[in-house]
Amino acid sequence: MIRLKFDIELGYEIAGSTSDFIFNIHAAQTAHQSVANEQLYLSQPVTPVIYTDLTYGTRYMRLQTAPGPLTVRYEATVDIAHYFESPENLAEVPISQLPSEVLPYIYPSRYCQSDRLGKLATWEFAHFQPGYPRVQAIQDWVRRRTSFLSGSSNSNTSATDTLIEQAGICRDFAHLMIALCRAMNIPARFVTGIDYGADPKLGPTDFHAFVEVFLSKRWYSFDPSGISPPMGLVRLGTGRDAADASFATVFGSVKSIAPVINIAAIDDPANGYTLPRHCTDVLSSTEPIHTQ
Amino acid sequence: MIRLKFDIELGYEIAGSTSDFIFNIHAAQTAHQSVANEQLYLSQPVTPVIYTDLTYGTRYMRLQTAPGPLTVRYEATVDIAHYFESPENLAEVPISQLPSEVLPYIYPSRYCQSDRLGKLATWEFAHFQPGYPRVQAIQDWVRRRTSFLSGSSNSNTSATDTLIEQAGICRDFAHLMIALCRAMNIPARFVTGIDYGADPKLGPTDFHAFVEVFLSKRWYSFDPSGISPPMGLVRLGTGRDAADASFATVFGSVKSIAPVINIAAIDDPANGYTLPRHCTDVLSSTEPIHTQ
Amino acid sequence: MIRLKFDIELGYEIAGSTSDFIFNIHAAQTAHQSVANEQLYLSQPVTPVIYTDLTYGTRYMRLQTAPGPLTVRYEATVDIAHYFESPENLAEVPISQLPSEVLPYIYPSRYCQSDRLGKLATWEFAHFQPGYPRVQAIQDWVRRRTSFLSGSSNSNTSATDTLIEQAGICRDFAHLMIALCRAMNIPARFVTGIDYGADPKLGPTDFHAFVEVFLSKRWYSFDPSGISPPMGLVRLGTGRDAADASFATVFGSVKSIAPVINIAAIDDPANGYTLPRHCTDVLSSTEPIHTQ
Amino acid sequence: MIRLKFDIELGYEIAGSTSDFIFNIHAAQTAHQSVANEQLYLSQPVTPVIYTDLTYGTRYMRLQTAPGPLTVRYEATVDIAHYFESPENLAEVPISQLPSEVLPYIYPSRYCQSDRLGKLATWEFAHFQPGYPRVQAIQDWVRRRTSFLSGSSNSNTSATDTLIEQAGICRDFAHLMIALCRAMNIPARFVTGIDYGADPKLGPTDFHAFVEVFLSKRWYSFDPSGISPPMGLVRLGTGRDAADASFATVFGSVKSIAPVINIAAIDDPANGYTLPRHCTDVLSSTEPIHTQ
């Protein structure tokens, strides 16, 4: 079991009259990720409306705020029980047997134009062994070719841009890997989270983005940016791509301050909590879904 | 009540070994659209797997086919009971009160990059009266500026392309209207269907694409291409954009023949069936959804 | 006569072995713009190769530099004798009569995809009176719709992006105006320069980009960003768009510091030097070209 | 010496009042390509204005036509004296020594966004031996990855699209090769022509597009589409990309018919005319340009 403790502080200055926010900063509550405790602080006397998506455990918080400054602070202690699987047991699922709820993740989306990448994906990846080896090859290809470079991308940057320019940040790595998987008819989706264990040279802890790929019966975690061991990832939001799973969507005239985030892992083997580490097994933090 | 009878014939030539298809050619079954009778014919001895999405009533049919020719024929008689509303009763719903299930439709998607259009939409539409007048203004703007021109767009064409090039077919009109609505924080989505009542000068009956916009408590139908009276639209699929609601997604090496489609409306007032016509009310064919 | 005195300081840190630079920071020498005096300082003991393009008077300086820091300082005093014309005398030239050397400026270029904008330009501008009123309408349209916003664009941003996103800096305003003129078959080109008279609220003096449009027999200056009176513009480079007329093109692994630029205008009416001002005439700083 | 005899027939239907055309269908007249005889036929009694670009030998013909049908027929017999060079003698020219007139061909252009491809080109081609081996590697890479597929591209398709979608026609192959060369700081440009010796399976003879790369002192011909031996290429237009060198640019409301083109090679060794053939030497049909 992994226990991670983190806090997020977001700051805004609201210029107009009122503004609407949709936050997705609460830790998701799933069969594999439970919240031991959590606390939310809002600097304005507003009542948040929290909606939980039952499929993904995602919690969306909507606020309507007054003009002036807004600080949002969230802290949580989260327990994650991963499911471990040997790579050799992970197979691609034929289109005809994919669970219906998985189907949306083979289609293209805002930032993952898999419809344009069929020939390229076939050229690069058709000769790999189907299943985990192919997905691993896609992840390696993206990681090898793409430079991690702050400021090289913006909110309009999509998988095809990253393919061409070979630079980006974690969300761009994720979009490109997702687009290439879908172009090979392998369902793939986008997860936002907080990561434990990143190289401090990459700068202060920030929101992270990673990938889930559907193999055999589950969604398995991959971090194409290579920043963190998949064992150290906390799930916040899940979606087709960053359009679905932004940590904050802001409606109105608002200036924002860079988020401040801290995360720590509990090293308490006596109580069953071990530190996240790299391992050869593939990790899932989702329940099995039965194929057709 | 509207009764429409239509048939669809699709033809393919499968080159490779086997191929997978996901069709969305069955009439949706909803509280407002019921199927009086229907018939499916497949030229290959394959068993279709049909999955019904309970939220939208969409029916997806998956086939795994052998090499050689494939003909798919579907015919149905469908009854549609519209909900009529006066334009002046239709209001925009504030972000903070949008039903959770409607939220995905304010985000950008593959073909509707609303995230890039905030300034333009504000420039063009902020001064209109919120609610139906604004949505109507968006529809008129798209219709007025865009030429209906077969062959001017392809499967990669998105709302921003149509905005720039001012030409397209029904799906392009729909994508642009959806993107502009979302850029104004008005939820909008994409519906594929068959339409009764198109101008025969536009060529033979084909699949159609139109728009639903969420106002007050329901999704209301708009046809920005202006091809058909909304009363003559049969719903097949519903999604964020054409990526979600294609009538056929083909996996494998397959040649396709242009679809052949016929549709007729039953004019039998004695039994309550009247012909689709243009009217001043706004039409919905969905159930109300309670706002937060 | 306008006399402007300016200096430019550029700083680089060259990481690799050697690096190549192509600068275009010398004031152009044309029949209408002469250099009273100028001085160049290079912090490395390298010999610049300066090439003068006889058509445009553009001076390109190539350097091959050693690793380490590089400072380039250029200062010049420049006299500009504008040609003034009343707007009502400026006509569009039919394609069949355009001078051959002007033809390249009706074709699309890297940042000005006029080939995609034919319908939109016709929609917006076909009803204006041809000649100066139409060009003025294009300039006003671009200026009115586009927000001047530092950081809203990057080196990949093109006219179609600016059209969609309605924000940019001077180069983006110029690209959009050029693309729309060409889409109406009006030759238009890109000029880089230094401008006198910008609103200090826009920040420190920087390189500027403006537009020349071919009407009647000459190229006339327009500044769609509205930052400066056209009378206060010094010409450095001239080209189809920013791809041709960058103040510095760097080959190699180099970090650059933001340019530091100063400009002053000489107010010495006794000697014939007056300050740049807004005026109702249209200005050219090029010689007439005879039409076919 | 190669002697090629070809004819081109173009058909238009002019709808509006008058229309303007700029044709580039005359064989270029250069030191290496001379016109033994030629004939032009126009179905309307209009006087063409022919302008010869002295740098490239390109001949542009402008017509202003009346409404109704227009047929343009051009036929010519052209003699081409190639310059042959061994691949091992062809070196890349350092930026600092490039002739000034060659400089425009290292910058990005409408269809060749080399500015976006620096990392990718370095990744793929930096490890090849500079000079001919690197250019050959770029050509092979483009040819190997890209499928020749009629209808897969349109007039908006650029090098980055072809890179992503891996399909196109000759002009798309040329744009991608040009963009990748420029991204490696190797000057490259676009030539339109007629080609002798194409595989008849590719359909009837059509206009062709190929690439010239500047190495050592000359522009050398490459055909990344692999359709024809470079020895069988007639030069019509030369430019940065297809935006500069279209065989016909049409201004007005005009419908066009597919061009009909025939070409034959004279096999008359007694008089010094041999058939085009593949050979191991690299071919140029331009004069040497002295480097700085």
Image (cartoon, coloured by chain):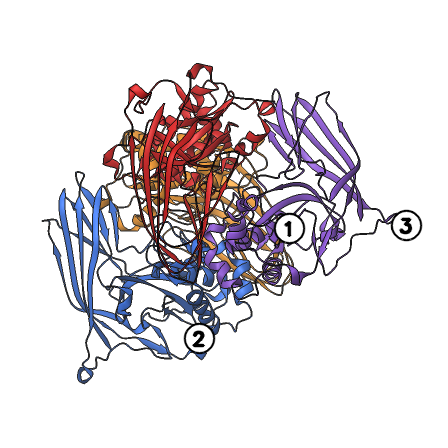
Chain colours: A blue, B orange, C red, D purple
- Give how far apart the Cα atoms at labels 3 and 1 are: 30 Å
Q: Could you say where residue A264 lies in the image, as x and y percent from the top left?
A: 19, 71
Q: Nearer the viewer, residue D84 or A3?
A: D84
Find numbered disc 2 in the image and state the secondary structure of the residue it sits on: loop
Asked if D102 appears above or below A209 in the picture, the reply is: above
Q: Disc 3 vs disc 1: which is toward the camera?
A: 1
The quarter of the rendered structure image containing the C terminus of chain C is top right
Find numbered disc 1 in the image and state the secondary structure of the residue it sits on: strand
Q: Answer with the quarter of the image where residue B127 lies.
A: top left
Asked if B251 appears above or below B287 in the picture, the reply is: below
Find numbered disc 3 in the image and state the secondary structure of the residue it sits on: helix
Q: Chain of mark 1?
A: D
Question: Disc 3 marks which residue?
Answer: D270
- Give how far apart the Cα atoms at labels 3 and 2 are: 70 Å
Q: Nearer the viewer, residue A195 or B245?
A: A195
Question: Disc 1 marks which residue?
Answer: D218
Nearer the N terminus, badge 3 or badge 1?
Answer: 1
Whether labels 1 and 2 share one chain: no
| Left or right of D23 on screen, residue C208 | left
